[in-house]
Amino acid sequence: MNHQLAKYENCLDCPNHEVINDPDPHDSFCDDDKAIVCKLLPNNRLDLNSGYLADRNPHKIVAPSIRPYNLRKEGGSPVWCPLKQGPSSEKA
């Protein structure tokens, strides 16, 4: 893979993130929850039977079940970010 080698402190600043809907199937108050996923890595915990949309997303989950107003606060770049540490971090 040929990745841009820029490093981002927050995934929301990275062009390889995606914000998806992740409503809580057990709490109607949280039906507008979001999740941040990394489009560079596959979801190594993929669960197609989960009630949570983030678990069923093909991309690696950075942060699930986030209130919309907390996206930036909870979107910090994880230690396993492939742009931080190179290809060896993709195993995390």
Image: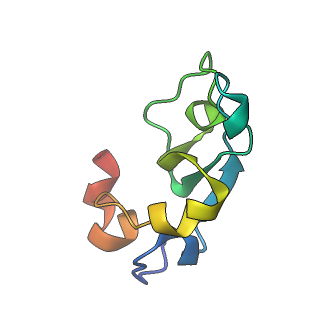
Picture layout, residue 34 above or below residue 83: above
* Residue 28: image location, x then y, percent: 73, 30
> Can the viewer see residue 42?
yes
Figure colour scheme: rainbow
Q: Residue at x 59, y 20 (%)?
A: 50
Identify the image quadrant of residue 18: bottom right
Q: Which residue is drawn at 66% across and 40% down?
A: 22
Left or right of 5, for residue 27: right
Residue toward you, 83 or 75: 75
> Can the viewer see residue 75?
no
Q: Residue at x 44, y 30 (%)?
A: 45
Left or right of 58, for residue 80: left
Which residue ends up furthest to the bottom in the rendered image? 6
All told, the count of numbered labels is 0
Left or right of 88, for residue 9: right
Residue toward you, 32 or 56: 32
Residue toward you, 67 or 51: 67
* Residue 80: image location, x then y, percent: 31, 57
Identify the image quadrant of residue 82: bottom left
* Residue 62: image location, x then y, percent: 46, 52
Q: Which residue is drawn at 63% across and 38% down?
A: 57
Identify the image quadrant of residue 81: bottom left
* Residue 14: image location, x then y, percent: 54, 75
